[in-house]
Amino acid sequence: DAGVIQSPRHEVTEMGQEVTLRCKPISGHNSLFWYRQTMMRGLELLIYFNNNVPIDDSGMPEDRFSAKMPNASFSTLKIQPSEPRDSAVYFCASSFRGGSDEQYFGPGTRLTVT
Amino acid sequence: AQSVTQLGSHVSVSEGALVLLRCNYSSSVPPYLFWYVQYPNQGLQLLLKYTSAATLVKGINGFEAEFKKSETSFHLTKPSAHMSDAAEYFCAVSQGFQKLVFGTGTRLLVSP
């Protein structure tokens, strides 16, 4: 298996632009997680899905952030409009069944908003 | 709500020395506990996991952790540090099928 795949690996955009991050979880995994990592705030859970359904989105910073999982093999995290404070590394992770199982992390997307 | 506290944002050891990274947890029910490692410019990967089967858990790369309920601790150790162990280490706690809650991380520095 190729592991969790994220694209793009790096994204540089200007403030106000829309940004879409993509994730392909490991086949057969039922849970998908989006995290954000910054020096100031560490690793934060933004949202997680179970069987394609959002279970907990309490970590989503504000309405500018949205996430979808239209099927078991694809998820997106969208920021519209983007702001410089959104600059971070965004990780996607998947697990077979929720938080009690090992989460497999993707390589991350490094987002820079200028 | 469950939480973990990692003592020390940075730990420095010499190559060959004992590695000890501290983690204390808070949980109202028996927890699942994890240690993850993050190498530079990579995602996190699992080192080991406690699920109540045994209090001493062995992981990859020679790491192990001991669950101590009386101390609410789950410290990570390795008898002899290697240069390749330099990375950031995260302790995490989960309850049942809920999300993982990560600690703030400890950066391990290994000097020759």
Image (cartoon, coloured by chain):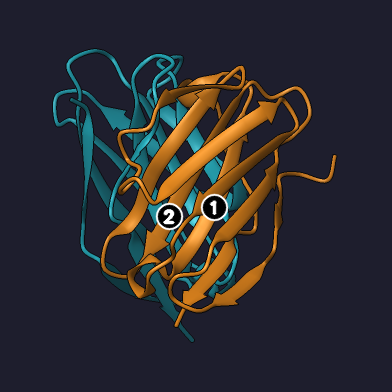
Tell me which residue sits at (60%, 52%) in the image: B61
* Residue B45 seen in render: no
Name the residue: 25% across, 66% down.
B9
Q: Is residue B15 left or right of residue B5?
A: right
How many numbered markers are drawn?
Answer: 2
Q: Quadrant of the N terminus of chain A?
A: top right
Q: CA distance from mark 1 to mark 2?
A: 6 Å
Q: Is residue A35 left or right of residue A69?
A: left
In this view, B22 is above or below B1:
below
The label on residue A36 is 2
A13 horizontally vs B7: left or right: right
How packed is label 2: few (under 14 Cα within 10 Å), some, or many (20 or more)? many
Q: What residue is at 22 percent from the left and 28 percent from the top?
A: B2
Q: Is residue B105 above or below residue B5?
A: below
B23 or B20, nearer to the observer: B23
Report the chain shown in cyan: B
Do badges 1 and 2 share one subunit?
Answer: yes
Residue drawn at (61%, 54%) of the image: A21
**Mark 1 Cα shell of 10 Å, populated few (<14), some (14-19), many (≥20):** many
Q: Colour of chain A?
A: orange
Residue at numbered disc 1: A91
Spot occupied by residue A31 in the image (x, y as percentages of width and height): 58, 25
Q: Position of residue B97 (x, y in %)?
A: 44, 16
Q: SS for tag 1?
A: strand
Q: Chain of mark 1?
A: A
